[in-house]
Image: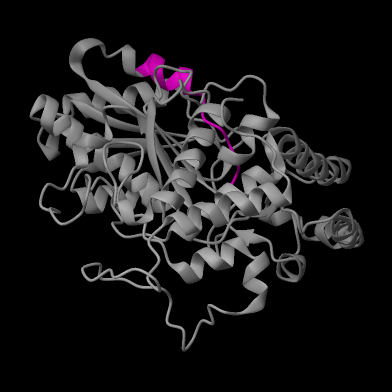
Amino acid sequence: MNVWQKLSKKELHQRVFDAVNSNVNYSDEAVLGVPASYLDPKVFNADAPFLDDAPYMTSMVKNPNHIGCHTIGESEAYFSGTQELEREVIRICAEDILKGEKNAQDGYIAAGGTEANLQALWVFRNYFQKKFQASNEEIAIVCSQDSHYSMNKGSNLLGVDIINVPVNDDTRLVEEQVLTELLQDAVVSGKRYFAIVVNMATTMFGSVDEIDLWVSCLKSLGDKVQYKIHVDGAYGGFIYPFTTSNNALNFKNPEVDSITLDAHKMAQAPYGTGIFLCRKGLIENVLTEEAQYVNGMDLTLIGSRSGANAIAVWMILMTYGPHDWKEKNEILVGRTSIICNKLDELGIEYYRHPQMNIVTIRSEFIPKELVTKYGLVPETHTANNRWCKIVVMDHVTADVIHHFLKDLVASKKTISVSL
């Protein structure tokens, strides 16, 4: 590991407090031009005794603004201390988790996986426009039908078409012939530039796309097209790389241009901690030159953002270190297997990627009362819903699983009659 290490509680607290204290201090310094301050003391007590042992809460009260992207060029010097912790998070994710070369990736803490995906599509669209003078009509987003709805948002916001490729209902994977035909049809209709999105665990199924198949289909088109590939690892990015030894969805693969992670899912960070990562030389395509009052380059979709969220991710990763993090995920995958083994025994149909902690059950095999009692999430909140999913997070303990399976076994006779 280049950057990632496990720190003691004392070391972790010291690093965070040192970083916060290296930022501007609104209480002691005459700062007249920054349109910001510490959190309102009438509401948030900056002198509360518990803050002495609460680095994350202290960072929230101090209110650092991490506007900009701190892996490239200059940044606002007022918040240089906590910006350094964000840079460490980006390097841990890009290099230690996703196998990138040292200092060869840019990135930032976004407001969530949706924003990080939109950032990637924005970068790709502008890249095609600037390098090839492409028109929006010649650009298309291409992803599977199981991809996150942020891809459709991106199509709408960026004014480019989207191609949602059907998947096999059992494997949840795109089939080569179907993908090839859709790409060929797109070329015939005038598409020349493809923003490709492959999934490192889809939201509903936890399915993982076969990037080699996508690349093979794209290359079969020859020099008719140009493409960039984004990996949506908003769900899988903090688990899949630790539970599989054969992972091509990382920066070691030269076909991968950008990746989304989402720390407020598997990393259990506060909401608002998506992560956007891309290879050097790409993010400049979304430079907003009009943001002249910002020191450095405005390269992000969000603009101003809380430095406290970056600190939260940094603290989580440094508390575990890589080895304990791997063990944490292996435990969750093991619990997921307990559920699947019982479903197999009961003859209940479901989808599960073997290295993931999501189980998606065909709705006709599970009573609605159990869906409600245990908070299973449907594929769609309509009468024709076909799937319901279980996500084995930290709070889904062995005891919770035991009670769910016990209730499921008890309902099996009812299910059999209804079938």
Which residue is at 42% across, 82% downward? 40
In-image side of 382 versus 397 (left or right) = left
Q: Relative to residue 145, is residue 131 depicted above or below?
A: above
The magenta stretch is 204-217
Which residue is at 71% across, 70% downward? 372
Q: Nearer the viewer, residue 27 or 377?
A: 27
**Residue at the bottom extreme?**
42
User: Is residue 384 at all visible to an observer of this figure?
Assistant: yes
Query: Is 208 colored magenta in this rendering?
Result: yes
- Indicate the quadrant containing the N terminus: top left, top right, bottom left or bottom right: top right
Q: Position of residue 38 (x, y in %)?
A: 41, 73
Which residue is at 57% across, 25% downward? 2
User: Is residue 149 at all visible to an observer of this figure?
Assistant: no
Q: Position of residue 307 (x, y in %)?
A: 44, 57
Query: Is 300 colored magenta in this rendering?
Result: no
Quadrant in which residue 127 is drawn: top left
How many marks do you count on the picture? 0
- Indicate the quadrant containing the C terminus: top left, top right, bottom left or bottom right: bottom right
In-image side of 169 versus 23 (left or right) = right
Q: Position of residue 80 (x, y in %)?
A: 38, 49
Name the colouring of the figure.
one colour
Q: Nearer the viewer, residue 203 or 301?
A: 301
Q: Position of residue 173 (x, y in %)?
A: 53, 31
In-image side of 129 versus 357 (left or right) = left
Q: Relative to residue 67, is residue 162 depicted above or below?
A: above
Q: Nearer the viewer, residue 264 or 27?
A: 27
Which residue is at 89% across, 41% downward? 345
